[in-house]
Image (spheres, grey):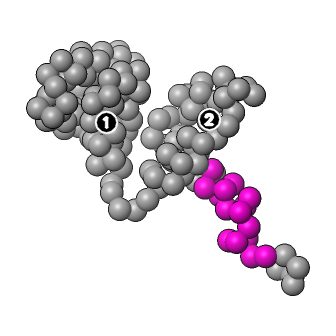
Amino acid sequence: MNATSPPASTDPAASQQSIYDEGMAVRRQVLGDAHVDRANAGIDDFTDEFQNMITRYAWGSIWTRPGLPRATRSAITLTAMIAHGHWEEFAMHVRAALTNGMTRAEIKEVLLHSAIYCGVPAANSGFKIAQGVFATIDNENPVEGAQ
């Protein structure tokens, strides 16, 4: 470092890039390279800032925090998806929850708990979607399936 350049930690652009890079690493670990590559393949001038924001804020600023294990973050995320009826995102996060160490039995418990706090119809939809995700996983890799 010379006298005219600030340390990297105070450089906002370097800081934002670091948050983005860390977020992208976590995003890939949790969602898988194939999902992230598909999301990034659709980036254009209209969506680039949105994808950048998701990577920095959700994955780089929240999912990287040390205060909760990833499995707990997944349980919270599943509940939020159920509560708001974000079913496409829910399916994606069922798979991510398994990647983050949740078991199918724990996902079932999240769904049962959500039936009380988010509503039975929402939990019913969640069960159907989770079953579909589990079936897809079982078909992709029958050996690892039924965990």
Relative to residue 11, is residue 26 drawn left or right? left
Q: In x, y percent, where is residue 33?
A: 55, 34
Pick the quarter of the image with the C terminus: top left
In what element is the residue under mark 2? helix
Q: Is residue 98 magenta?
A: no
Circle number at residue 45:
none
Q: Residue at x 60, y 24 (%)?
A: 38
Q: In x, y percent, where is residue 13?
A: 74, 59
| Res. 124 in view | no
Number of marks present in the image shown:
2
Q: In this view, does 57 lie above or below 44?
A: below
The secondary structure that dominates the magenta segment is helix
Comes first in the chain, label 1 or label 2: 2
Q: In x, y percent, where is residue 79?
A: 27, 36
Q: How far apart are marks 1 and 2 (CA)?
A: 20 Å
Q: Which residues make up the magenta segment?
A: 6-20
In what element is the residue under mark 1? helix
Q: In x, y percent, where is residue 81?
A: 33, 31
Q: Which amino acid does label 1 sit on?
A: Ala
Q: Which of 147 and 106 is in front in this view?
A: 106
Residue designated by label 2: 50
Q: Is residue 62 above or below residue 43?
A: below
Q: Which residue is drawn at 47% across and 35% down?
A: 31
User: What is the crowding at mark 1: few (fewer than 14 residues within 10 Å), some, or many (at least 20)?
Assistant: some
Q: Residue at x 11, y 32 (%)?
A: 116
Q: Which amino acid does label 2 sit on?
A: Phe
Residue designated by label 1: 80
Q: In this view, does 18 lie above or below 144?
A: below
